[in-house]
Image (tube, rainbow, N blue to C red):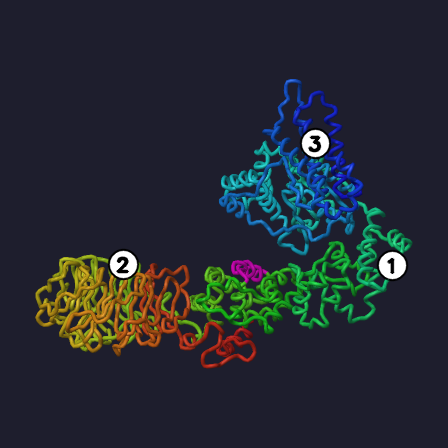
Amino acid sequence: MAEVHPYANFARTSLSSAYKVVQKQIWMDQSIVNLMTAMETLYSFMSVADNFIDGKLNILQQNIKTILLQTVECATLISDYAHQGFAGDTCRVFRIKDYAGTCKRLIQGLHDLQANFETGIGAQPVFVSYRTHGVVAETSTHQILDRLMPADMYGSVHSECLPGTCQELLGRIISWATDINSQQNVFWLHGVAGSGKSTVATTVAKYIGEMHRLGAFICFNQSFADCSHPSMVIRTLAHKLGTFDKQIGKAISEAMEGYPGVKDASLSTQFTELLVKPLSSLASLQDKGAIVVVLDALDECGSDKTRAGLLQVLKTKLHQIPSYVRIFITSHSFLNDIRGALEHQRVHKECLYANDADISAFIHKEMTRAKEMDRNLPSDWPGDERIDKLTSCASVKFIREYAPTRRLETVLWSAQDFVTDFHDVLSIILAAKKPLTTSAIDKLLSVSQIQGSAHIVSCLSSVLSYDLDNPAVPVHILHPPFADFLSDTKQSGQDAWYIDKDTSHKDLAIACLKRLYTKGLKKNICNLSLACQDWKSKDLPEDIAYACIFWVDHVSATADSSIALIVPYIEKFLQEHLLHWFEAMSILRKSQETIRLLECLWRQIPEKSYQNLHTFVLDVWRFAQQFVADMEEHPLLIYHDALPFSCKDSLVYKGFYNHELYARVIGLKVMRHMDWVESVAFSPDGTCVVSGSDDKTIQVWNVPTGTQVLPPMQGHQDWMTTPSMCGMPTQAPKSSHQLKGIRTGCNQLHFHLMAPVLSLGTQVLPLIQGHKGWVLSVVFSPDGTHIVSGSDDKTIQVWDTSTGTQVLPPMQGHQGAVLSVAFSPDGTHIVSGSDDKTIRVWDASTGTQVLPPMQGHQGAVLSVAFSPDGTHIVSGSYDNTVCLWDAFMGTQVLPPMQEHQDHVQWVVFSPDGTHILSHDVGDIWLMWDAETGLLSTSYHISNFPSFSTVVKGQWIVDQPKNKTLGKIPPHIRCLASASWGTSLAIGCDNGKVIIMDFPPLLCASSETTGVIASGVRDQNDGAFISEEESFKPVLEEKNSMF
C-alpha cells in the first residue's frame, strides 16, 4: 500500500504500533476485538484486490485515502484504549464515554469503506472520527470570540510535499501528533532557508485537517508584518481554537466574560486566561484524541525585539498546555532567541535536511512540466545523467549563497540600467509595510508598466513570490535571508546590490507623498453624495490606498538625519491635500488610524528646526481627535461638518475654510443660554433669531454677526417651549410693534413688545391672564392690533396688543383642547382646530361661530391655515391626513390627502395659494396641488423661505433639492431648529444657539459629481477650483510660515 498513497506509511506505522501495544495486554474488551477484526477483514480484502487496483487507481484514489485515514483514526483509539484501559487489575474503565458505541460507529465506517472499494465506484466516502467536535454554533459565543480581534493569519501559500517525498519525516510527525500520551506535545522542526520547512508544515496541516484534528494553522510572513505581529498571536490562536471546537469556544468565551479586558492584557496573562485555563478545564477533551496547532515560520513573527515577550511566554508557560493539544512549530535554525525558548523537555526537536531522493523527485517534476510546455524537446530530455548532476549540485545553501552572488553577476545584471531598476524595485519591496502588486510599485515609482517592475520580479522567482499569470497577486520575499543579504554590505558584496533600509523608507515616504499630490487625491474622489449611505462599498486604487495609510509610517522609519529631505514634500501635501487625505482615510475605513499617524508625525518632526510645521501638525492632530466620529460616518463630512464646526482660531480652519464653499457657523462661543435651548425662531425678514431657554429667558441674536441684540428678556417663572416671532414669518404684522408670545407650563401669557429695530426688548405689557389651562397656540392679526390664543381649557380668546386686555368674551364651543388658531387674511375671521376632531370658524369682531363645526378628521386637528385669498382652509390631523375646506360653506372640497405615515403637525398654503405644504412628526414634508389634492413635484419648497432648510435627526437637508447639506456634529445635540432661506438656527442642550448659513455655491453644486452647477471646473482633477483659488493666499502664508 505504501506505493499506492502517501497516507499508507502513516496507516501502517499507526496500526503496527497499536497492535503491538494491544498484544501485551492480558485482557481485552470485546468491542476493541471487534474493531481490530473489522480492520483485519478490510485489509485482507484489499490485499486480495491488489490485482485490479492499478487499473482503477484514479477512480479509487479517494476511497484508498479515506481507508488509510480511517486506519490511523482506529489505531489512535486502540492506542488510547491500551494506555487508559489497564491502569490496574481493578480499573478497567475507559474514559471515553460510550466507547462501545464509538467502536461500533468506527466498525460501520470500515464496512462502508469496504463496500465502496469492492464495487469500484468512486463515490465520496465518509470519514468517521471518534473525536466529537463542531463549529461553534451559538451566535453569542461567536460574537464574544470576535472581540479578540484576531489577525488574518491565513494558511501558508507554500505548496505541499511532492508525493513520495519526506515520507519518513511526515510519518514521525503524524505519529507524534496523534499520540496524546506522549508528554512531548511540542514538535520543533528547524532548518536553513529553503530547506522546505513551510512545505512540510503545509503538508502536515493538510493531513491533520483531513483527520478533523487541525485546531489552527498559522503561517507567519514578514511581508504581512501587521498580521504577523507577536501581539496578535495568542488572541488569534484562541479565536481559531474557539471556532474549531464548541467546548473550547464556550470555555474561552466564559473566560473573556470573566476577564473583559483580557484582549488588552499582557501576553503572559492572555496565554494563561485564553489558553491554559480554558484548555485545562476541559478534561473530557483528553479522551477524544489530539488537537493539532501548526505554527509555521516562527522566525518571521516580528523581529527579535518585538517577539521577545512572546518567546518568554512560550519558554515559561508552554509546558502548561494539556498534552492533547499538539503544537507543531517550524523556524530557522540559527536564531538563538527561538532556540532558547524551545529548549524544554516537553519539546521534540528535529533539523530538516534536504536529501538527494527528494531533490531528485522535485527536479523530475519540474523537468516533466517544462517538457509538457515545450513539445519540441526530445522525449528523453534532460536524461538521468543530467538530473543526477543537478541533484548533486543542489544545496540548501543555494538561496543564501549562489542566487544572490554568482547569478547576479553572471546572468542578469550586466547593464547599469538594470542595476538601477533592481535597486528601485527591491527597495520598495523590502520597505513596504504590506506586499504590493507590480502595478502599484510602478505607480509609486512613476514608471510605465512596459518598463516596470514585473521584469525585475520575474527574474527573481527563486526568492520572490510572483504570479506571472495573475498580476493582482502581491509580490513578497519568500525567504528572509534574501532580505538580510540585500541589507547587509558584508553579504551583498557590491554597492550595487546593497539596499539601505533607512534610505528605502525615506524614498518610499517621498514616493507616497508625490503619488498623492500628483493626480492622486482630490475632493470627492469617489463621486459620493452626503445622501449616499452605501459609500463603504467604495474603495481606492491599491497605490493610492497604500500611500494614504503608510506614508507617515515610512516617515517615522526614516533616520533623523534624513527628515529634512522629506519636510518639503510633507508641507506641500498638508497644504494642498490634508482634507482630501481625511476623506480618503474615511473611504478606506481608517479614520481612527489618522489620530495615531498624526501623533507619530508630530513627534517625528523636530520642533526646533520646523517649529511652524510642528505646530500645524499638532493642530491637525487635535482636529482629527475632535471630528473622527464624523469622518467615520461619511467621507464628505470632513468638508460639510468637521471644517465648519471647528474652532475659528485653529490653523486648520484658517487654512482651509472657504465661505463660498462651506457653511458658515456662527455663535459657537458667544450665543449661549445658561440652560437647554428648546425653541428658536427667525424674525420675518430673517435678520434676527429669537431663542427661548429653560433658563427662563428670551434672547435675540443678530444673524450676520451672531452678536446679542438685546439683554436677556426675563419675566417668565417657568421654562419655555414654543416662542414665535410675529406668528408665521410670511405674514408680517403691519403694526409698529412686534410681539413675542411664549407658551409656558401654566395658564398665562407673557408678551414682549419690541420696536421693529429691536432696540428695547422690555416687557411693555403686564402679565396677561385669562385662560384656565395651558396656552397651546398664539397668533397675530394681519394688522398686528390683536392676538388670538387657543388653550387646553377648550376656549379661544382675543386680546388687544396695545393694552393687553381681553377684547371679546371667551369663544366656547369646542369639546376638547384648542390646538391651533389662525386669522383670515383680512382679519375678519378666526379658524380653530381642536382635540375634538373638529374645525370651527368664528367672527373676529363678535366672537360668534359663523359656520357649523367642520367634521371629517378621525383624529385631533393639529394645524389650520387660511389660503392667501381667504376662500379655503387647510387642516392637518393626528389621523395622518390633510383636508381642504370651503371657508364660506364649511364643506370639504377634496377627499382627504392620505400620503403621510404619521401625524400631520403643520400645514400652510403657498404664497400664491396653488399649493399646500405639510409636515408630520416623522419629519416628512409633502407638497400638494391645492386644486387636485395630488402630490406635486412642479412647485419648489423654496417658495417657503422658512422651511427650505430643515434638520432631520442630525442631518441638514435642503428641501427644495432634497439634498443633504451637512450634519450637526455628534457632540452637539439639537433640541430645536428654525430656518429662513439658506440660514438655519439650532438650539442645543448645552445652552448654545448656533446659526449656519449655507453659501449659494454649496446649495447649487452637485454632490454626486463634485461639479459646481455653473460649470466651473478645475481642469486638472475636477475638484472645486474656487476652493484652490481661495486657498492660494493661505498657501503663500503657510509657505512663509513653514
Q: Residue at x 62, y 32 (%)?
A: 102
Does dot 2 land on a helix, a strand or a loop? Answer: loop
The quadrant of the image that shows the N terminus is top right
The majority secondary structure of the magenta stretch comes to helix
Crowding at dot 1, Cα within 10 Å, few <14 / some 14-19 / many 20+, comes out as few
The quadrant of the image that shows the C terminus is bottom right
Specify start and end residues of the magenta stretch as a single range: 588-603
- The amino acid marked with disc number 2 is Asp
Taking the image as shown, residue 797 lies to the left or right of residue 147, namely left
Pair 2/3: label in front? 3
Circle 3 residue: 38
Crowding at dot 3, Cα within 10 Å, few <14 / some 14-19 / many 20+, comes out as some
Q: In the rendered image, is residue 564 in sight?
A: no
Circle 2 residue: 694
In depth, the one of 110 and 85 nearer the eye is 110
Q: Indicate whether 457 appears above or below 177.
A: below
- The amino acid marked with disc number 1 is Ser
Q: Tally the numbered discs.
A: 3
Taking the image as shown, residue 663 lies to the left or right of residue 929, namely right
Q: In the rendered image, is residue 133 in sight?
A: yes
User: Marks 3 and 1, how far apart in space?
Assistant: 47 Å
Cβ atoms at labels 2 and 1 below 8 Å apart: no
Q: Earlier in the sequence, mark 3 or mark 1?
A: 3
Circle 1 residue: 379
In depth, the one of 300 and 70 nearer the eye is 70
User: Marks 2 and 1, how far apart in space?
Assistant: 97 Å
**Disc number for residue 923:** none
Q: Indicate whether 405 appears above or below 927.
A: above
Quarter of the view holding residue 941: bottom left
- Measured as percent of width and height from the top left, residue 103 is found at 64, 31
